[in-house]
Amino acid sequence: MKIKQQLEKMSYLIKRFQRELRDVKPTPEFVEKLKSMMEEIEEAIHSFKEQHRIKYDDLMRSEKTLYLELQQLERKFEAWNQATRTDNVASQAASSKIPTIVSDISKDLPPEVVAFDKFVQQSGGHQGGWDEQDHQTFLRYRNMYKGRIVFLDHVKPLLPLHTETEIREHEAWFQEYTFLYESKKYAVKKWREKKEEDKEDAISQVQSQLESQKEEDTKKHTLTAEEKAEKLNQINAWRVQKELEKAIKEERKIREEMEKKKQREEDRKHQLETKRKVEEFQKQKHIEEEVLAMINEERKREENERRREIIAKEISRFRNR
């Protein structure tokens, strides 16, 4: 719902409530009706205030976010001013300050800005806790009478939801609000002027340091003929040394390969000799086993012959009986 429609709705509800008050009826039904109308008005006002409070909070967060970004830029300029040798050191210096900014925004704000923001937050926002229509009516008549206190008598009938005491308290609040707001504007202006001066000084110092560094680098790269010759001799000596080390390394590698090959040959000869001995042993063992088998066979044959002779003798003797 648009703001104009909300204001028209609240105005209609209030006027209807005022019309009902012109003809008061001391009945429970009439009291209940007034109560219902008051609740409806309060709900509309509360809804309107809540919506604008959310918008105000969003604006406050946006303002602080923008201010934080500005602070970060200023911190970077200060970090560049402190840089000595490399951009890396400067970036580290800048990044090391960022958590401090995030952790406490008000630390870097001018005191007048902090005081104004604190006052606004604690006193109901930029309208002092009033809804926008009442506050604008208050401001319109105050400006009309150029702030003279007599305007309170003229604005009072137009603010039926506020007592005279509340209107006077709102006037006192607005005076303090105006004073703090002007102080904030002046402090921010001075702060920006100072930051601009500091930024220009920082840029000048950085440029001066860059020029000095550039001159120093130019001197370092400008070598004399003797220095160039010495440098060339050092490079040649380094190359010869590297070639010598490479040759020694290659010779060592070849010698190691030859030793490994010789060792492999010896291992192979040893394996062949061992294999020959094993085969010879197995062959000798086989011959011995065959000889033993023949001897055993001969013994068995002789044993059988003796047994047959003994048996034959026994048979012959038995027959002779």
Image: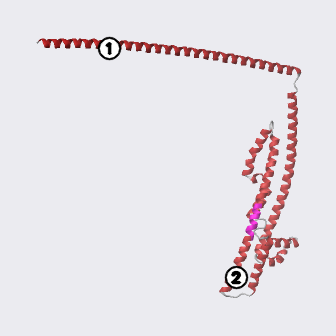
- The magenta-colored residue range is 48-58
Task: Kindly state the secondary structure of the residue where label 1 is placed.
Answer: helix
Image coordinates for residue 23, horizontal then vertical, percent:
74, 87
Instruction: Identify the residue position indicated by label 2 in the image.
Output: 34
Residue occupying the point 27% across, 11% down: 302
* Applied colour scheme: secondary structure
Residue occupying the point 85% across, 34% down: 213
Of the numbered discs 1 and 2, the one sitting upstream in the chain is 2
239 relative to 253 in the view: left or right: right
266 relative to 288 in the view: left or right: right
Instruction: Identify the residue position indicated by label 1 in the image.
Output: 297
Q: What quarter of the picture does the C terminus occupy? A: top left
Q: What quarter of the picture does the N terminus occupy? A: bottom right
Image coordinates for residue 311, horizontal then vertical, percent:
20, 14
Task: Kindly state the secondary structure of the residue where label 2 is placed.
Answer: helix
Q: Quadrant of residue 299?
A: top left
In the rendered structure, does residue 22 fall within the stretch colored magenta? no
The answer to the question of whether label 1 and label 2 lie on touching residues, with beta carbons closer than 8 A, is no
Q: Is residue 317 visible?
A: yes
Q: Is residue 145 visible?
A: no
Q: Badge 2: few (under 14), some or many (20 or more) residues near its Cα, within 10 Å? A: some
Residue mark closest to the camera, 1 vs 2: 1
Q: Main secondary structure of the magenta part?
A: helix
Image coordinates for residue 123, horizontal then vertical, percent:
75, 65
Position above or below: 102 against 156: above
Residue situated furthest left in the rendering = 321
Question: For the residue marked with disc 2, what is the amino acid?
Answer: Leu
